[in-house]
Image: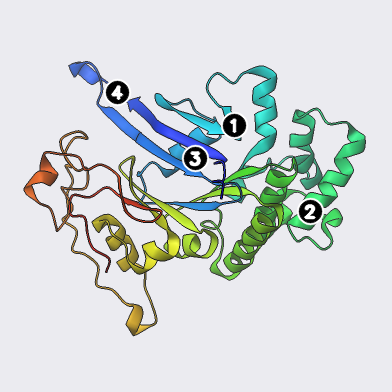
Amino acid sequence: MKAETPFVVVEHLAKHYRGPGGWRGAGRLLRAVDDVSFTLAPGESVGLLGESGSGKTTLGRLLLKLTEPTAGSITIAGQSLAGLRGQPLKAFRRQAQLIFQNPFDALNPRFTIGRCLREPLLNAGLPRAEQGPLIERALALARFTRGLELLDQHPHQLSGGQLQRVVIARALILQPRFVVADEPVSMLDVSVRAGILNLLRGVSRALGLTAVYISHDLSLVRYLCSRTLVLYRGALVEDAPTKALCNAPRHPYSQALVAAVPSSDPAQRRLPLPLVASTAEAPVGSGCRFAARCPLVMPICRTEEPPLVAVAPNHRVACHLGLPAA
């Protein structure tokens, strides 16, 4: 059986920033994303999981060409993003869209909802005759049963859940093939999150979207994603099927993330690993970047950075321990 051609190919991707230099000269190098490689199959939904500062949002911006990489390459649908300019870049923008984290800031408060939805169509240069049907389709996908009644309203007249559905509709209006959602429910009340998650999962499956969900919330990733990439200090430390990651995480950092999720089922409760509190982690390149906080650290961890290796089918881990399945 012929292997499916990947839709997204990321190879040795890096994004580094130089901090303020001060009187000492060159500033400290911040490795926001550091030598990350993975592929996504067409129609696959993948989660980017990690704490704040792990590099999730920077990686999402790189995938959408909203920032330029320091090194490495990204290929989407057979097209390299390197050097995309002018009309090819404009065509790529139609195929790859972002769902913003904060719907209250994502929409121009001076525009009506109709104008907010029409904006990407105007930017794409679509004739006005084609815009109406696309707006109606996007509103239907976002599950607005009477969506046309909203077009003359302004963002302040809508609830948070309605605004996020407008943001989702705007992201889908150009019929993209690839979507990055950055913490899509973190700004919403708990009471409306389930509806938005059901919407995202339904739309992703119905349209066959290749989707990346950025989150620090394991429950969101577990619900939406068949596979999860765990990032720590810019590096990919575990790449696994979501079910395997939740049931038997291999990397100590992944184990800590999974154990920290509250559970009402006593059989599912885990004791969190007692992570070492560290305010001065070792510089990248001097060993495992998690060594300063890892309770299972070994001498080799402080001198050699572990490679990302396969430990099971479709499961890669960067850890010297070579942890067995739990």
Q: Quadrant of residue 108?
A: top right
> Is residue 148 depicted above or below 15 in this figure?
below
Q: For the point 66% across and 58% down, which residue is it?
A: 205
In the picture of the structure, the residue carrying the numbered disc 2 is 139
Three-letter amino acid code at the position of disc 3: Gly
Q: Position of residue 46 (x, y in %)?
A: 50, 52
In the picture of the structure, the residue carrying the numbered disc 1 is 78
Mark 3 vs mark 1: give the one in front.
1
Residue 154 marker: none
| Residue 178 left/right relative to 278 | right
Three-letter amino acid code at the position of disc 1: Gly
Neighbor class of circle 1 (other Cα within 10 Å; few <14, some 14-19, many 20+) is: few
Disc on the earlier residue, 4 or 1: 4
> Label 2 vs label 1: CA separation?
30 Å
Neighbor class of circle 3 (other Cα within 10 Å; few <14, some 14-19, many 20+) is: many
Q: Position of residue 157 (x, y in %)?
A: 73, 55
**Viewer-nearest residue: 54 or 286:** 286
Q: Residue furthest front?
A: 1
> Label 2 vs label 4: CA separation?
45 Å
> Label 4 vs label 1: CA separation?
38 Å
> Is residue 44 depicted above or below 15 in this figure?
below
Q: Assess whether mark 1 and mark 2 are in contact (beta carbons under 8 angstroms).
A: no
Three-letter amino acid code at the position of disc 2: Leu
Q: Assess whether mark 1 and mark 4 are in contact (beta carbons under 8 angstroms).
A: no
Disc on the earlier residue, 3 or 4: 4
Q: Disc 3 on helix, strand or loop? A: helix
> Label 3 vs label 1: CA separation?
18 Å
In the picture of the structure, the residue carrying the numbered disc 3 is 60
Quadrant (top left, top right, bottom left, bottom right) of the C terminus: bottom left
Q: For the point 38% across and 83% down, which residue is it?
A: 265
**Viewer-nearest residue: 268 or 248:** 248
